[in-house]
Image (tube, helix red, strand yellow):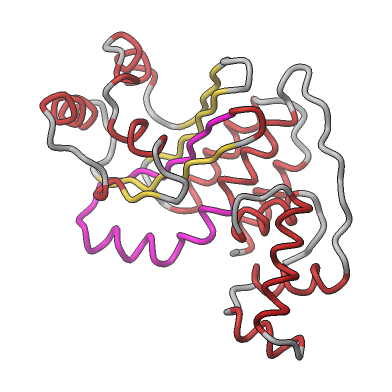
Amino acid sequence: MKPRVEQILEDLEQATGLEHLQIAVEALRDHYRVDHVVYHWVSSSGEQYGCGTYSPEWAQRYQEQEYLRTDPVILGCFQRFHPVDWKMLDWTSRAARTFQTDALKYGVGNQGFSVPIRGPNGQFALFTVNHNCDDATWERFTEMHRRSIILVAHFCNQKALEFEPGRKPEPAQPLSPREVDAITLIAMGHSRAQVADALSISEHTLRVYIESARFKLGAANTTHAVARAISRGLIVV
């Protein structure tokens, strides 16, 4: 990740309340030079929380029209576990087209990249980067920043969960030195073959280390494991 992102996450690590997430998403919007960054979650008790840079008028319109029921981003991401470019979603229905037309009127960009996140006890969250540009520009942007956005998304969600009322801290399981080495090199952008070579082990052995680290971190995938390891200070990138 770029130094600016690291500084934003370091500031967020010191957060003492949900309001600091709003400061973080605004800083991330400026860093990525996009129109909007949005984080929205549903807690294990059903409570919803959102922060982001969409206009208050759009937030009100969204609620009044009950767009939560027809929003292709919400519906599409709830069925997926991996990051989603909005162009991959189904916008063909009349309800979806109506929603999209209305959203554009309120300043929502025509391009989007959303990271669905599933936390403990049924928690569901979305982290979205949104912008108005042509397809080629957006493709270059997502290729350049995809990994960083995924890490930031999981970091923000992990921090938000710390403020959930009544939540008990998750028991921390220490990573072994080899697991730390493996996750650190993966976080730095090295391929699995490169990591295995650097550690003088086989790719099969590397896979064992990564899977063990994922289990200890309670991570859904390797990217999630990297995000959790960074957020908990277990590795430094």
Q: Quadrant of residue 227?
A: bottom right
Left or right: residue 103 compared with residue 83: left
Task: Decide whether residue 24 is among the magenta residues.
Answer: no
Front residue (pair 52, 225): 225
Q: Which residues are magenta?
A: 123-151
Residue placed at 87% from the left, 66% from the top?
Answer: 176
User: Can you give x and y, in whole percent of width and height, for residue 121 in the image?
Assistant: 65, 28
Q: Does residue 229 lie above or below 218 as drawn?
A: below
Front residue (pair 202, 65): 202
For the image, the number of numbered tags is: 0
Task: Decide whether residue 124 is among the magenta residues.
Answer: yes
Left or right: residue 92 compared with residue 43: left
Front residue (pair 78, 152): 78
Q: Quadrant of residue 15?
A: top right
Residue placed at 77% from the left, 29% from the top?
Answer: 16
Q: Does residue 153 lie above or below 136 as drawn?
A: above
Residue farthest top in this picture: 64
User: Can you give x and y, in whole percent of width and height, for residue 103 in the image?
Assistant: 24, 28
Left or right: residue 127 compared with residue 102: right
Q: Does residue 153 lie above or below 229 as drawn?
A: above
Left or right: residue 190 compared with residue 64: right
Residue placed at 19% from the left, 31% from the top?
Answer: 100
Q: Does residue 77 lie above or below 194 as drawn?
A: above
